[in-house]
């Protein structure tokens, strides 16, 4: 982690849970972290708790279902910190509605948060790295290990489907970066903890 000291990481869904824990650990290791979330006040509160560590945590308000919010966040990072070196796509949303009678808006939200938003973040992070000739960046997509299996009796089919889509996108990204002879790393980090709500 020493090589990342002083570098800039953008973490989505950083207000609670896994995202907040990731942001905290990065700050402990000297990383400058920009946390995106709708409840930005929670990130700001966490930042106050981390003042003794060598890194820094900034909170930027963003609704990840809105592309304009994501683009504004990347502009803020560019204007204030130079650009993104690490991207952690962590934000998640889950619904326990059954597929046979769930409202369509829940399906759209699942794909907006788990597929479209990470894709926009990946595109913008790659542009940020390329513009600054950063070739040692890192993109991390957070998945649940349970998406490797059938949802069986759990009424969270759309969560599984959208997270599997992110898995496919990650592998496609890895291959595209290889074709571009880029040394930017792409990682899937699988967690055994299932999300309990939107982050």
Image (cartoon, grey):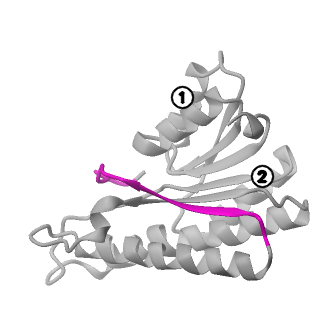
Instruction: Report the residue marked by disc 1.
Output: 46
The magenta region covers 182-198
Q: How far apart are the alpha carbons under marks 2 and 1?
A: 20 Å
Q: Please provide percent x and percent y for residue 10.
A: 65, 50
Residue drawn at 24 percent across, 78 percent down: 103
Q: Is residue 186 magenta?
A: yes
Q: Residues within 10 Å of mark 1 (few under 14, many from 20)?
A: many
195 or 96: nearer the viewer: 195
Q: Is residue 93 magenta?
A: no
Against 115, residue 94 (above or below) is above
User: Going by the picture, which residue comes out furthest to the left?
Assistant: 153
Residue 71: image tag: none
Q: Please provide percent x and percent y for residue 175.
A: 64, 80
Q: Would residue 14 be found to the left or right of residue 56 on screen?
A: left
Residue drawn at 85 percent across, 58 percent down: 134
Q: Secondary structure at mark 2?
A: helix
Q: Secondary structure at mark 1?
A: helix
Q: Looking at the rendering, which quadrant does residue 129 occupy?
A: bottom right
Q: Please provide percent x and percent y for residue 19.
A: 48, 45
Quadrant into which the N terminus falls: top right
Residue 76: image tag: 2
């Amino acid at each position: 982690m020493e090589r990342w000291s002083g570098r800039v990481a953008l973490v989505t869904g950083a207000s609670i849970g896994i995202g907040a824990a990731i942001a905290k650990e990065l700050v402990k290791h000297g990383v400058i972290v920009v946390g995106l979330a709708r409840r930005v006040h929670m990130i700001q509160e966490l930042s106050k708790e981390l003042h003794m560590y060598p890194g820094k945590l900034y909170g930027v308000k963003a609704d990840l279902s809105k592309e304009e919010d994501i683009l504004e966040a990347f502009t803020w990072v560019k204007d204030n910190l130079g650009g993104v070196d690490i991207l952690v796509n962590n934000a998640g949303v889950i619904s326990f509605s059954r597929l046979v009678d769930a409202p369509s808006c829940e399906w759209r939200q699942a794909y907006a948060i788990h597929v479209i938003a990470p894709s926009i973040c990946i595109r913008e992070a790659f542009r940020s790295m390329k513009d600054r000739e950063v070739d040692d960046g890192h993109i991390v997509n957070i998945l649940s290990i349970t998406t490797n299996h059938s949802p069986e009796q759990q009424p969270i089919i759309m969560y599984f489907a959208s997270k599997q889509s992110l898995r496919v996108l990650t592998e496609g990204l890895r291959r595209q970066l290889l074709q571009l002879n880029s040394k930017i790393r792409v990682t899937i980090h699988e967690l055994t903890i299932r999300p309990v709500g939107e982050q």
